[in-house]
Image (cartoon, rainbow, N blue to C red):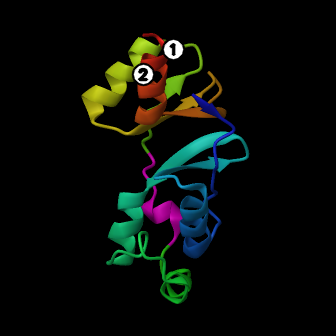
Amino acid sequence: MSDSPITGTINEKFSAVVKKMEEGGIHHLPIVSGTDLVGIISSTDILRSSFSDLYVSSNASTNESLDHTVKIEDIMQKDVVSLKDTDTVRHAADILMKNQFNSIPVVTEEKELVGIVTSKDLIGYLASQY
């Protein structure tokens, strides 16, 4: 699990979210309210919202024009599948495979975001076992 993941909020501008994802080299951005997980945005959500390949070839002026029309709350996935911080690696692998996800947020019982598990994290863990 990667702890202290890069996060966004529903009040951020579209261009700020895109910039965070690009600069962080990430494809999934948990959206929080305080420390509570309230949604997640993927690079696919960004592409779908921008109608072009803006995520790959960042066009700041186009992203900034979308700041006025695209709300983070409207494009984020609100019904987020997550892991509890007490779940096993096996459970994480099962959820990633079953849902064909590439990442899954990790939360406490109180829905506080404490990390994110990616398929890369899982592969790294498995490689270290052999």
**Left or right of residue 119, residue 99 in this image:** left
Quarter of the image where one finds residue 114: top right
| Depth check, front residue: 66 or 27 | 27
Residue at x 65%, y 65% (from the top left corner): 11
Instruction: Look at the numbered disc 2 and give the secondary structure of its residue.
Output: helix
Q: CA distance from mark 2 to mark 1?
A: 7 Å
Kind of residue at badge 2? Ala
Say whether residue 75 is magenta.
Answer: yes
The residue at which mark 1 appears reads as 87
Q: Is residue 92 shown above or below 37? A: above
Kind of residue at badge 1? Asp
The residue at which mark 2 appears reads as 92
Residue at x 51%, y 48% (from the top left corner): 39
| Depth check, front residue: 29 or 53 | 53
Extreme-front residue of the structure: 130
| Depth check, front residue: 110 or 65 | 65
Q: Are marks 2 and 1 in contact (CB under 8 Å)?
A: yes
Q: Residues within 10 Å of mark 1 (few under 14, many from 20)?
A: few
Extreme-right residue of the structure: 34
Image quadrant occupied by the N terminus: top right
Q: Is residue 130 shown above or below 114? A: above
Magenta stretch?
71-78
Residue 118: percent from left, percent from top: 46, 35
